[in-house]
Each structure stands twice: as C-alpha cells, then as structure tokens.
Amino acid sequence: MERRFTEIDENFVCTNCGKQVEKLGYSCRNHCPFCLHSKHVDINPRR
C-alpha cells in the first residue's frame, strides 16, 4: 500500500504571522500554534 502522508517534524517560520515555530519532537505540526494558520502540504491529498 502506498503511503500518502509523510511525517515531517521540523522548525519553521509561519508565513502568516512570521513567528518561529519549534518542532514538536514526537509528531508533526501542520499549523502555527500562535495564529492557527495552516497550509495544505500533502502531496497526495484525499480524493
């Protein structure tokens, strides 16, 4: 079965509010915890 989700746990700068977001260390994060902005980043979204 093809894996459709790649878990990436890394620091990033929010493209909406500009704050530095630290990695979780145990899972991935797909939104900014400060402004709750998120981007859809799946390569293979659900159909």
Image (cartoon, rainbow, N blue to C red):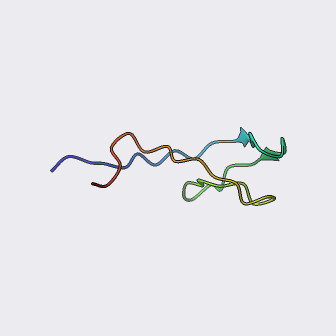
Query: Looking at the image, which residue sits at the far left?
Result: 1
* Relative to 28, residue 11 above or below: above
Q: Is residue 28 left or right of residue 14?
A: left
The residue depicted at 83 percent of the width and 41 percent of the height is 18
The residue depicted at 37 percent of the width and 49 percent of the height is 5
State which quadrant residue 25 falls in. Answer: bottom right
Q: Is residue 15 left or right of residue 4?
A: right
Q: Is residue 44 left or right of residue 12?
A: left
Please tell me which residue lies in front, 18 or 27: 18
Q: Position of residue 39 (x, y in %)?
A: 59, 47
Query: Looking at the image, which residue sits at the far front?
Result: 47
- Counting the numbered discs, the total is 0
* Relative to 9, residue 36 above or below: below
The residue depicted at 72 percent of the width and 54 percent of the height is 32
Q: Position of residue 36 (x, y in %)?
A: 72, 60
Q: Position of residue 10 (x, y in %)?
A: 63, 42
Q: Is residue 20 left or right of residue 3?
A: right
State which quadrant residue 14 falls in. Answer: top right
Q: Position of residue 45 (x, y in %)?
A: 35, 49
Please tell me which residue lies in front, 27 or 15: 15
State which quadrant residue 26 falls in. Answer: bottom right
Looking at the figure, which quarter contains the C terminus? bottom left
